Image: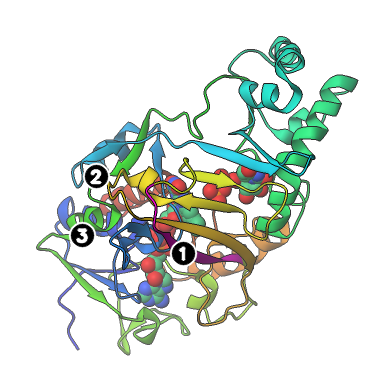
């Protein structure tokens, strides 16, 4: 069979859609995108539920970046709703009730936890040691030998990190990659936003329309509901497509262990169960996200209307997230790579195998086995497209 396209992209999430657009537009390539789901946008996919609320089917997504190039690039395909994400921890208050304070744990959280006077004193001490507006990871804070700071670090560890991390990863903060808890540091500030990036917000009409616009180019063909592994063959010395040797570029954004039939064993992941609930009220929890850092089986509850700004006074939809080990079952999605030395080494075996095919490129959260935010994978996709086009010239 003679193919009419130059490049094959597997997956229509951030990685696949952006690389496809660049190859098609900047490179003038004919690009075929195969997506096994029946929709584009990967895990950022959003849609309206039965109550008419715009929800994120694969978990809440808030866009934030300091990367102007990425922001400008995406801004060609969407307008933005300005949205500063705020998260609170909801914990038992020790007297039969519950209390809340901002996460990341900050100077305001300190005063709620320890009372205004004591909280202020401790806050001043922290600022003296680390500096104002500084972000200090919980693991760094726990290194401090000063008895008062050590006690404070223990408090934050016990009330914010240890149970949440156990629920999310099945491991303690010491056992997981330190970069993971470093995403939510103790913040010596009154700024109670979850992110401090220059650009943050939500695509005004949602993520899915943004992806449709990215993929809307005469040189791009998107086929949904198409399993690429039914057509790609990497079992021999050369890459084959539909049974014939293929020397066009293949940009693969799915799981690399699956691409190579799990021949070295499965790469471990965490998956999530999402429980969506629609309530007959305007505002269920007052915040975009509430983290349950000490109890409950779920990690957090997100209420979508806060993120999207949708106005629908009599109804609201929330989602609870339950984390568990990924087993590879058909109905599970591998959401989070479990980054550690042995898993990275296993990934390295697959990467080396992929390296035997000069026209095969691994890109994305799954294919690279990384904890990329949306902006980071967008940046990677732009860089890879430039690299491929640079080589082609
Ligand atoms: P994906 O979005 O997973 O896309 C890969 C696509 O490839 C999928 O659509 C898949 O179906 C398809 N595919 C795989 N294998 C095949 C195959 N063999 N054949 C055909 N198609 C295939 N980032 C943020 O910046 N902010 C957030 O608030 C945020 N929240 C998140 C919340 C959760 C619960 C999770 C799990 C992630 C969150 N992220 C967030 C990260 C964000 O989801 C990723 O950065 C982004 O989705 C990565 O894009 P990707 O293209 O690499 O992967
Ligand atoms: N974390 C925590 N308590 C919190 C928030 C985060 O222990 O209230 C830890 C936990 O280990 C989590 C990590 O910090 O997995 C990163 O949190 P983030 O909100 O960035 O996770 P994501 O949104 O990517 O799931």
Of the image marks 3 and 1, the number of the one nearer the N terminus: 3
Q: Are marks 3 and 2 in contact (CB under 8 Å)?
A: no
Q: Nearest the camera: 334 or 388?
A: 334
Cα separation between marks 3 and 2: 14 Å
Would residue 60 be found to the left or right of residue 11 on screen? right
Whether the magenta-drawn stretch holds residue 124 is answered as: no
Would residue 388 be found to the left or right of residue 343 on screen? left
**Could you tell me what secondary structure mostly forms the magenta stretch?**
strand
Q: Which circle, 3 or 1, is nearer the viewer?
A: 1
Quadrant location of the N terminus in the rendered image? bottom left
Residue that protrudes farthest toward the left in the picture: 218
Would residue 190 be found to the left or right of residue 177 on screen? left
Q: Which residue is mark 1?
A: 276
Whether the magenta-drawn stretch holds residue 278 is answered as: yes
Disc number for residue 204: 2
Give residue 3's position: percent from left, percent from top.
Answer: 18, 80
Cα separation between marks 3 and 1: 25 Å
Of the image marks 3 and 2, the number of the one nearer the N terminus: 2
Q: Is residue 360 visible?
A: no
Of the image marks 1 and 2, the number of the one nearer the N terminus: 2
- What's the residue at 34%, 61% (across, down)? 45
The quarter of the rendering in which ligand 1 is drawn is bottom left
User: What's the image's color scheme?
Assistant: rainbow
Q: Which circle, 1 or 2, is nearer the viewer?
A: 1
Disc number for residue 212: 3
Give residue 330's position: percent from left, percent from top.
Answer: 51, 82
- What's the residue at 45%, 43% (across, down)? 288
For numbered disc 3, what is the local secondary structure? Answer: helix
Q: Magenta segment range?
A: 270-282
Cα separation between marks 1 and 2: 22 Å
For numbered disc 2, what is the local secondary structure? Answer: loop
């Amino acid at each position: 069979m003679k193919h009419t396209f130059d490049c094959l992209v597997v997956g229509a999430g951030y990685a696949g859609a952006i690389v496809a657009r660049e190859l098609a537009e900047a490179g003038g390539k004919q690009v075929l995108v195969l997506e096994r789901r029946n929709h584009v946008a990967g895990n950022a996919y959003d849609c309206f539920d039965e109550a008419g609320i715009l929800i994120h089917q694969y978990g809440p997504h808030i866009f934030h970046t300091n990367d102007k190039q990425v922001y400008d690039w995406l801004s060609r395909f969407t307008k933005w709703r300005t949205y500063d994400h705020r998260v609170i921890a909801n914990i038992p208050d020790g007297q039969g009730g519950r209390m809340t304070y901002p996460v990341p744990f900050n100077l305001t959280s300190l005063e709620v936890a320890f009372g205004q006077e004591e909280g202020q004193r401790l806050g001043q001490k922290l600022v003296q040691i680390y500096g104002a507006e500084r972000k200090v990871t919980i693991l760094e804070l726990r290194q401090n030998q000063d008895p008062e700071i050590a006690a404070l670090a223990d408090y934050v560890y016990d009330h914010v990190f240890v149970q949440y991390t156990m629920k999310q990863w099945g491991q303690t903060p010491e056992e997981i990659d330190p970069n993971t808890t470093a995403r939510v540091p103790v913040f010596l500030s009154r700024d109670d936003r979850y992110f401090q990036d220059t650009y943050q917000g939500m695509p005004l009409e949602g993520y899915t329309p943004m992806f449709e616009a990215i993929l809307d180019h005469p040189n791009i063909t998107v086929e949904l509901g198409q399993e690429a592994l039914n057509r790609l063959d990497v079992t021999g010395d050369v890459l084959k497509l539909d049974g014939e040797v293929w020397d066009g570029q293949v940009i693969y954004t799915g799981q690399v262990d699956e691409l190579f039939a799990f021949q070295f064993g499965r790469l471990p992941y965490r998956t999530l169960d999402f429980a969506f609930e629609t309530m007959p009220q305007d505002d269920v929890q007052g915040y975009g996200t509430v983290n349950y850092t000490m109890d409950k089986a779920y990690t957090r509850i997100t209420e979508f209307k806060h993120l999207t700004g949708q106005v629908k006074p009599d109804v609201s939809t929330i989602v609870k997230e339950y984390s568990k080990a990924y087993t590879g079952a058909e109905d599970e999605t591998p959401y989070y790579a479990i980054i550690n030395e042995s898993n990275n080494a296993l990934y390295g075996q697959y990467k080396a195998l992929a390296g035997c095919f000069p026209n095969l490129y691994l890109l994305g959260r799954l294919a690279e086995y990384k904890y990329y935010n949306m902006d980071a994978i967008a940046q990677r996709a732009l860089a890879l497209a430039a690299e491929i086009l640079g080589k082609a010239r």
